[in-house]
Image (cartoon, rainbow, N blue to C red):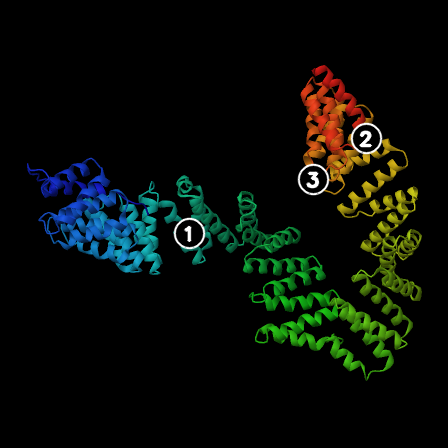
Amino acid sequence: MRSRRALTLIAAALLVLLIAASARAETPEEQLAAASALFDAKKYAEAAQRLDQFLAANPKHPKAGAAALVLGHCYSGLKQYAKAVPTYEKAVATKDPAVVPVAQLGLGEAAIRTEQWDRAAAALDAAVQTPLKAEQGSLAWYWLGQARFQQGKFPAAEEAYLRVTRDYPSADIVDDAYFGAGLAALRQEKTEVARRWLLTVVYRFPQSPDRPQALLLVAQMDLDAKKYREARSQYEAVLQDPAAKAAGAELLTAAENGLVSALLGLEDYPAASTRLEAILNRLPPADPQRFRVQLSLGNCQYHEKQYEPALAAYLEAAKSTEGAVAGEGHYWAANAYLALKRPADAALQFGRVFQRFPKHELAARAQLKQGDALLAAKQVDAAATAYRTVVEKYPQAPEAGEAKKALGELVNAVTDPAQLLATLKNAAPAERAAGMLRVARLYLDGKKYPETITTLTGLQKENPPAAVAAEGQYLLGLAYDAQAKKQPAAAAYADAVKRAPSAAWSADAQTRLAWLYVDLKQAPNAEKAANAALALKPEADTERQARLALVQASLDQEKWDAALESCRLLLAGNPPQETVASVLFTQAWVTEKRGKADEALPLWERLAKEFPKSDYASDALLHLGDAQFKAEKWEDARARYAELLASYPASTQAPDARFKLGSALYRLEKYTEAAAEWDRLSADKKAGDYVPEGLYWAGVALDKAGKKPEAIDRLTRLVTGYPKSARVPNAKIRLAALKAVAG
């Protein structure tokens, strides 16, 4: 609701109370006359000072009440309402009938301005009991409505607002009064009455600044009443109202959010999706509201069976810092994964609800559904753990009963490894060996590597069946590998694949063994292991890792053709983009290594163009620049080097690129620009050996540019600062020549 003028309504009544000047100077009357003149000139600060002095010296003066009133008005004029309140109260306390009504009005306004609602209400209650002019009366009742509203006395507030509408129908605050009455009725849950007053603002006062807010409140009432069609119409009217833009972004945001809720209530998911996408496009990237919008958008797309975009939206929502939103994001992302028949991924998302937000309202349900998803993914042991977590953490939840039932149906549910080991002591040898293998897996899954190794060492002493012994060695390799113990890990993997060369895990073991051999600088063994893994026709991820290991083994042995063939096969397998970038770099590097720089150029071009954010993009630009430089295409080379420096200023290639950029500019006879680049290079503490090179060539370029003193400076800094540089002898000769010319 708008602030209304007040001071002008009581100003005219004030001056006459003070003006009664005497001919004698320095008298109280003279002081009042001076204050009156200052007040009349709107010099409120000076008037306040004189009035304050007058009241301090003449507290019993007949015009003390009038003086206090005017002093209060001065403070109000200065917007010092906290000072105005006690001053007006002094005026009221004088009980001067000519002063009290106006002072009560001033007190009411000042108290409202300082949010002293009780004082405001008491003063205005008294003011409205006195004869007031129409403009004063309308304001007094309106202010009283505001005070009562803030006190939480909504029936009294509604009545005060309605007095304005009944007794002062021509006042310019009638629209505000109807709006206030609507708010007060709404707080009393008198929705129909509230609707009547708010719609009065909408239809009788089309120019009222309260109109958009009134229309928004009516729409919200319809939404709360689940009258979605009516709410939709009202929200759309708000968004189409030109005055709504003037009311501020907050109102428009509320209207758009309400419209989305109405569309969801109507199950008009396409329209809701369109609105939500528009909201996302307008929200800044860091706005936390984006996560709520993503959640709603995901729900729309999920209902439309658009599971992939729904999943993307839910995963964005899961990044929210609000636990309620992030938890729902994970939960519904999991459901989207289930709809896409990806139960393992679904289980991961369900688990994150419990892990991140164990008190979330969906945590128990999510944990139960994680068990179901893990079971669907044939991860029986993990499913049992999930079900057991529901029983232990949410024993009172309805989901606990469902989890107990599911646990009962799991024949081979995995228990605690320590308990399982205790049980295995009395088991038959074959069962004990299989059980110890399961214990080792449990420890391995829990990243308890020493316990894993101890268990598997004990397993080998049990003389287990060949298949169990082989798998035990594979698990032993995993345990050593996780601790970066390369030699024992390689020995365990090698023994495992020797015992069971065709086991389900053999391809993974051979691939891991290949990489270990690469790290151990045993390239022939790495090549052999990678080829053995590929011969088993493993899954795509394992095949890709095996081929990558084979590429590295070939490079280490300088088998360029073999490396290129492996790269070709890798690309044929539609690998992830980061793998593509790595393979392209390898192809280009090997092609250059074989002396076919021209054939490497398209590869460097593709790497720079398609993978600008990869670790290899700066290498590609450097190679492309070097090719142009070699071809004496100085301008093209300059552009490549400049692009590298602009896009990757912190790359390890930056000093090399800057030196070569200077060289290209030098060849273009842009000597001053070349010198500037070499100066930057010599100032770079990370440039290493390029620092003296930069100084030398900057001196040469500046000499060419006719800047002899600057050339002398650079060459002198080289000679004195880097006396062991290979450039020093030439620098000294150039210095001698330059100094001779300079005299």
The earlier-in-sequence mark between 1 and 3 is 1
Of residues 282 and 457, the one nearer the viewer is 457
Q: What residue appears at the point 91 percent right and 72 percent down from the top-left corner?
A: 466
- Can you name the residue that lies furthest to the bottom here? 426
Quadrant occupied by the C terminus:
top right
Q: What x and y, as percent, mark residue 635? A: 74, 24
**Residue at the spot of label 3:** 650
Element at label 2:
loop
Element at label 1:
helix
Whole-number angstrom distance, CA of label 3 to CA of label 2: 27 Å
**Amino acid residing under circle 1:** Ala
Whole-number angstrom distance, CA of label 1 to CA of label 3: 55 Å
Q: Mark 3 against mark 2, which lies toward the viewer?
A: 2
Whole-number angstrom distance, CA of label 2 to CA of label 1: 82 Å
**Amino acid residing under circle 3:** Ala
**Amino acid residing under circle 2:** Ala
